[in-house]
Amino acid sequence: MQRKGILIVVSGFSGAGKGTLMKRMVERFDNYALSVSMTTRKPRPGEKEGVSYFFVEKDEFERCIGQDGLVEYASYCGNYYGTPRAWVQEQLEAGRDVILEIEIQGALKVKEKFPDALLLFVMTPSAQELKRRLEGRGTESQDDIRGRLQRAVEESRGIEAYDYIIVNDDLEECIAQMNRTIEAARMRPDRKKEFVDQFRLELEEILKGEN
Ligand code: 5GP
C-alpha cells in the first residue's frame, strides 16, 4: 500500500544555510518534495518566480488567506510568508515527504494542525558564525541584518517546540544528519501503526489456528 508522506518542517535562523541545505536534500534524495511559499517580499537578485517563492502583492496574499488557501502563514520582518495548501496535500497523499522551510510562528501552527509533523531546527555552530554568514551573503542592508539577528534572539526562545536541532557546520555532514533524522522518524510507532495492527492480526490468526 502507498505510504502517506511525512510533513517535515525545517526552521532556522536566517543565514543558517537552510536554503542551500534544502536544495541539496531534494537534489540528492527523490522522496523529498520542497514546498514553494508565497511571499509579499520583493525578489532578491537571482530569485525566480515559482521556484524561490511565488512573489505576490499584499492584497493577493490576503485574498489567499480569506479563501483558506494556506496551510499556515506568518509575518516576518515586515512581510507575509505562507504555505500554499493544495500542492502540499497532493504531495502527501501521493506518499512523498514534503519539506516546509518556514519560520517559527508558522512551524508552531503546522504542529497544531498536524501533530505528527517532524520539526527540525537548523543552527550555525555559533552566533558569531551566523552574523558572519549573513554579512557574507551581501543581500541585506546592515539594518536588515540587525533585524534578522534580533529575530534570531526571539526565535531561540521557541526552539524547545522542535523535535531535533541540526547544526550546519559542514554541509555534507548536515545533509546526511538530516536524512538520518527523517529516516529515524519514519520508524516511530505512530507512523508504523498499520504495520503493528497487521502484525497483531496475524498473531491472533496464528493463535486461532493452533486451537
Ligand atoms: P527569506 O526572506 O530569508 O527568504 O525568509 C525569511 C523567513 O521566512 C525564513 O525564516 C523562512 O524560513 C521563512 N519562510 C519562508 N517561507 C515561509 C512560509 O511559507 N511560511 C512561514 N511561516 N515562513 C516562511
Image (cartoon, helix red, strand yellow):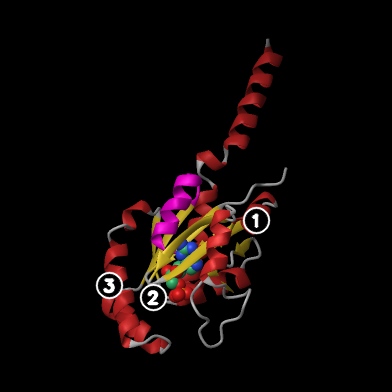
Residue 122: x, y in percent? 40, 67
Residue drawn 38% across the image and 54% down it: 162
Mark 3 vs 2: CB contact within 8 A: no
For mark 2, give the secondary structure.
Answer: loop
Residue type, numbered disc 2: Asp
Q: Is residue 99 visible?
A: no
Magenta residues, start to end: 102-117
Magenta-colored stretch includes residue 50: no
For marks 3 and 2, the one nearer the N-term is 3
Foreground: 43 or 120?
43
Q: Is residue 49 visible?
A: yes
For label 1, the crowd category at 10 Å Cα-Cα, with few meaning under 14, some 14 to 19 and many 20 or more, is few
Please identify the dominant SS of the magenta region.
helix
Residue at numbered disc 2: 169
Dot 3 beta carbon under 8 Å from ligand 1 = no
Q: Is residue 139 above or below residue 1?
A: below
Tag on residue 86? 1
For label 2, the crowd category at 10 Å Cα-Cα, with few meaning under 14, some 14 to 19 and many 20 or more, is some
Residue drawn 61% across the image and 26% down it: 200
Mark 2 vs 1: CB contact within 8 A: no
Front position among marks 2 and 1:
1
Residue at numbered disc 3: 150
Q: Is residue 91 left or right of residue 177?
A: right
Mark 2–mark 1 distance (CA, rounded to whole Å): 35 Å
